[in-house]
Image (cartoon, rainbow, N blue to C red):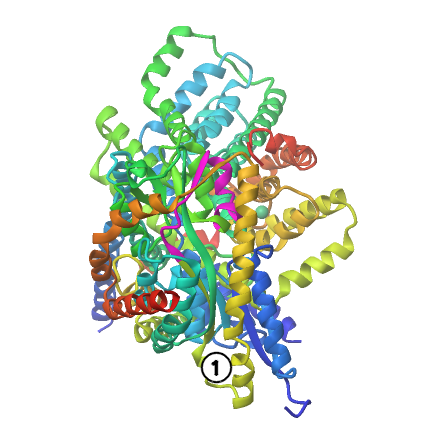
Amino acid sequence: GMGTAAAVEMKYAAAAAETTPWVAEMKDQAQRIEENSGGAIKVQVFTGGALGDEVKLVQSLRRGRLQAAYVSTVPLASIVPEIGVMEAPFLWESNEERDFVMDNYLFDIYSELAEDKGLKLLAWSELGSTSLSGDRVIVKPEDVKGMRLRIPEAKSSVHYINYLGATPTTIPVLETASALQTGLVDGVFTTTIANFFFDFYKNVSHISMTEGTYYATMHLVSKKWFDGLSEEQQAAVLKDAQRTTVPGRTRLRAVTQGLAKKIEEAGVTVTYLTPEQRNVWRDHFKASNDELLDLLGGKSREVFETILKAKAEFKSSKS
Amino acid sequence: MFVMLKTMTKGIHSTLIRVEWTAAGFGLFFITLAVIGDVVMREAGTGGIQGAVSIAVLVMIMTGFLGVPLAFDDNRHLRITVFDGLWPWGAELLRRLSCLLSAGLLLCFAWYGGLFALESYELGEQTVMFSLPLWPAFAVLPYAFLSAAVRMLLYLCVPDLQRNREKDFA
Amino acid sequence: MTLFLLFVLIFLLFILRQPAFVVLGVAVGYVYLFYGSGVLVDIAQDMFTALDQDILLAVPLFICAGSLMGQGTIAVRLIDVAKQLTGFVNGGLGVAGILSCALFAAISGSSVVTLLAIGSVLYPALVREGYPRKTALGILSSSGTLGVIVPPSIPLILYGLVTQTSVLDLFLAGVLPALLITAAMVVWVLYKCRNMPRTRWNTSELVLSLRRGTFAILMPVIILGGIYSGIFTATEAAGIAVLYALLVEGLVYRELSFALLRSVVKETVVLMGVVFPILALAVSLNQFLAYENIPQMFAAALMDFTETKATFLALVIVILLITGCVMDMTPAILLLAPLLTPIAMTMGVDPIHFGIIMVVSLEIGYLTPPMGLNLFVASSSFNEDFSTVVKGSFPFVCVMFLTLVLITFIPEISLLLVSGG
Ligand code: NA
Ligand code: NA
């Protein structure tokens, strides 16, 4: 850095609204990158979908039009289909187990898969685990049968809801609160934070924290842009990147708990599953993984095998 | 010689029209069917075909862009007409000049649309549910602008190919 | 300097008779080259992603349904009912024109489609009954604009799309303002046409027209009822409207022919071809502004300029009315809603209410020269002088402006029916 040279511009965008915890996390990361670069990189944060929805953000990253984005894994489903493996129903035993597997094994696997598609994975954080909402208490898989549930458009979520004998419905986020109001759908398959920020919870009487599917979020950088940076600049972008996963997750888990409480205070009955009840769900889905892996294709089976091995390693390290 | 050129121009034009109208008709039919089918199947409790509506949106975009050259045939594109009366003596010259200019600009549009479709092909972009390639849908952009540019050159030779021309001189 | 050149370029292209979407495309290319990324392929990406939205499926389907009903007999039957209901007062046929447009608007999302469907039948009738051409043109062109404020409405769908607000709430919020505008227009016509002929009240004729028009009248009930009882979404309602129109015209009224279908397809595809490139390019311009952070700067400047909510709203109305004079509603909403709505929200204006303010203000723009879509359509399809249409519509512009002031400063008119909030 000669000091007089113009700073490199890094436009960093998300579809999430300004008030969400994800944007707080982005701004932290932006600040760190600017500091590490000693002013050689100037980061500009765009929120609320100003530069497009998540699908478009990823499209723009791959073309090098946008330099960085913070997105959920949903828009990556058609680019890195293997991402759906970690969304397999009732795959994880605990937060600790999942964090261990994700950070020690999956980060490298998905980094490589994403890099092949022109995306550089800086760090990941989380969207959260899914709940099922509706007009009734949901404690066992049969309770969902026949319900019409709004899902995000991804193969893994269609598979999940079909396997419960419920009807998956992919209507736009924008129309979902209305659809709940009019009864077009009975409930939503989504995370607590989304339930809160999109007002889905206002139109249901029950939310059951089944935590069946886990969704991660990703801080992505355009490979096209990154490759054009100087070595110092690249180092500045990467330096603290992986560190953000831990504070990010901790913050989001705290926020999730707080929002669940707010939702409860608003008069919605929030149900948590007991370990025995969770086992019933896990058994229900036991035979479904094969089907899902076929559906996802690519290297999904290899990724799944790795996850199983890593889970075993975590278990033995604990005993 | 001139008559032959005229016949050829008309031939190209009517072929374009026939192909484009047929494609657009099927497109519209598919959109309608997909939306109605989705509602009916959901109400029947079968949940519809996941991803069918997303495909319908792509078909809608393709149909809409086919409408760009077709709207030229009826002279329906919005245009500011207040300056039309300025040079009554040069009306025909101006008309030809405007045809040529439109053709040139539309070719530029087609060029960048084509680059976009090519990029998408190279990136291997796909739809979410059926993993269908997206570039054929994107390719309708360059097609539509190219076809519109061709229209302009055809009108240059045979002005009568464009209907509602009298609207221009109202 | 480069900005000045841009305006010269736009002016030149218009003089050289280039279509609006071509001029817009050149202008967007120019700003990308000189102020933006410099990569023109970005525009193609914007154009495609702009249109790749489930909600937009409603646009061709509403145009298609409207065209089916207008060219078939549903519109005529609706008009018959309205005529029987209002014929007994002086100026009753004029009032029937307004009411038919309002009824038809409840099944059509567009202003032009409404004007064409009702106008093509009622204009000759009004002239035959001795109404001055100017008045007849004014009545039809202005009540045609009800198409975009009575739900369902394509502009409200677009507003919901770009501001991330609920389309259902926007539709609900449009109901009372639409009734207010309709009532104001009816009062004006009753006054203006107090010397026009009337017919005797005839119950049996009314019953007959109701019987003949049952399925036509049921249509708004099915569309709006289906949306609010959760059978289909506002977007899907457009598909149901097509299905219902096909069934009624085909099976009940038996007026469906291959020629009719062909002409409907043609009308729909051509309108898509006219609207889509403008819509897509407007979004690309929006994306350019967003990438360059211009909305934030614009918001800051506007906030400095206005102190209270009232002055802000007054300023917004002025901006929108001027915009409406020179620009069509679709690009105006796509360009201005993402710019103005966030500011409105920080000023404490409900985004749903703001959507109604925008649509009503721009609705007036359909009737103001030089760029007034309903003026163009009325003048070309009824074969009348442009200036006659402008003069005939002027009193209605004034009436609508008064209702706009009420709608803007009494938020309850819009928000009363919207639940939750
Ligand atoms: Na309407
Ligand atoms: Na106007």
The residue to which callout 1 is attached is A226
Residue A207 is covered by the magenta coloring = yes
Q: Residue at x 51, y 13 (%)?
A: C198
Question: Which residue is outermost to the right?
Answer: C307
Q: Residue at x 22, y 27 (%)?
A: C251
User: Residue C57: percent from the left, percent from the top?
Assistant: 37, 47
User: Residue A116: percent from the left, percent from the top?
Assistant: 34, 77
User: Residue A22: percent from the left, percent from the top?
Assistant: 54, 60
Q: Classify mark 1 as within 8 Å of ligand 2 or not, answering yes or no.
A: no
Quarter location, residue C238 = top left
**B111 or C226: nearer the viewer:** C226
Q: Quadrant of the N terminus of chain B?
A: bottom left
**Mark 1, secondary structure of its residue:** helix
User: Residue C319: percent from the left, percent from the top?
Assistant: 67, 50
**Residue A307 in sight in this render:** yes
Q: Is residue C206 above or below residue C338?
A: above
Question: Which residue is outermost to the bottom?
Answer: A2
Q: Residues within 10 Å of mark 1 (few under 14, many from 20)?
A: some
Q: Is residue A65 above or below residue C413?
A: below
Q: Tell me where the magenta segment starts and ends, as one range.
A: A194-214
Q: Residue at x 67, y 76 (%)?
A: C1
- Identify which amino acid the numbered label 1 is placed on: Phe
